[in-house]
Image (cartoon, rainbow, N blue to C red):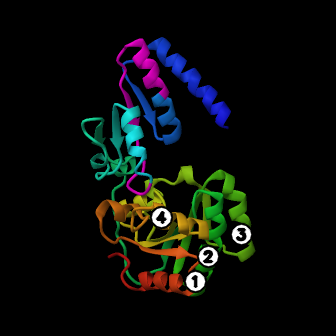
Amino acid sequence: NIFKLYFLMNELIDQVLREKPDYIFTVDTKIFSLIFALKLQKKRKKLNFKMPIIQFVAPSAWAWGKWRISLFEKAFDGILCLYPFEPKMFNKNKINAIFVGHPLSWELKSSKNNQKNRKINLAIFPGSRMTEIKFHLPLILNICIKLNELNLINKIILPTLPEFKNIISKEIKIRKIKNINLFSRKKLSPNILKTVDLMISSSGTVTLETALLAIPGIVIYHLSLIDKIFVKFFVNIKTPVLPEIILNQKVYKFFILPNSFEKILNNIIFLLKNNISE
């Protein structure tokens, strides 16, 4: 879609220059927003009028690609950061970077009231990309089968994107797992999450949601050989789990796949049987 996006970008820039708004806010979509802002900055200077350009969501340069910081400093007048450690990445003489918090933290609060020695509700989050579903889902579903055999699970909730629903439904039917409630990710409300006692999740923003609600669990992620090489040479963080990066302390057990099925299963059973409310 690169040509379509480039055409859209030029249309937007023309509209901005015609209407001359007081401020421009770009939201996430970092590559598009960056190129849009750089082009708009050039036009703005030629026409000699003020119009601050502010980006909401900083680049994840704390994880990889620190070279992007200088580009963002050049493109934007201000940046609204999701995480408290992000403003320090930027030169305050070049850009006004402010920590505003993650939208999830504005609405999610824990209200856990766990009881020991009862069957629990499990949430599973295999991922939001096709490759993540492909590698994570079979392992997670096989763990669910084992937990059901041990009579430890009441119900399992599996929120997903509409485009993956048929694929996931097929995998569930093959394994004959009857206590999975599959529904659209858009319908995952805080009230549903508050009924969850334990989770198994792909690494991603969802771990921030579960941590804010004090839901224990484990985090997994599959890395191909190419991914492992990329991580070794370009990634600057020790853990990909967002709550741990923010708090600088261990929150969830993290497993890189392919890994021992038994090792992951044993950790889940340990959490189930050893006071998960802690």
Quadrant position of residue 182: bottom right
Q: Does residue 242 appear in the picture of this structure?
A: yes
Q: Which numbered disc, 3 or 2, marks the residue closer to the eye?
A: 2
- Circle nearer the viewer, 3 or 1: 1
Quarter containing the C terminus: bottom left
Tag 1–tag 2 contact (CB < 8 Å): yes
| Circle nearer the N terminus (3, 1) | 3
Q: In the visual, does 74 lie left or right of 260?
A: left
Residue range highlighted in magenta: 39-64
Pick the quarter of the image with the N terminus. Answer: top right
Seen at 38% across and 44% down, the residue is 69
SS of the residue at dot 3? helix
Distance from disc 1 to disc 4, alpha carbons, whole Å, reads 28 Å
Please, is residue 46 above or below residue 147 in the view? above
Q: Measure the C-alpha gap from mark 3 to mark 2.
A: 11 Å
Tag 4, which secondary structure?
A: helix
Query: Which residue was labeled with disc 2?
Result: 139
Q: Which mark is residue 233?
A: 4
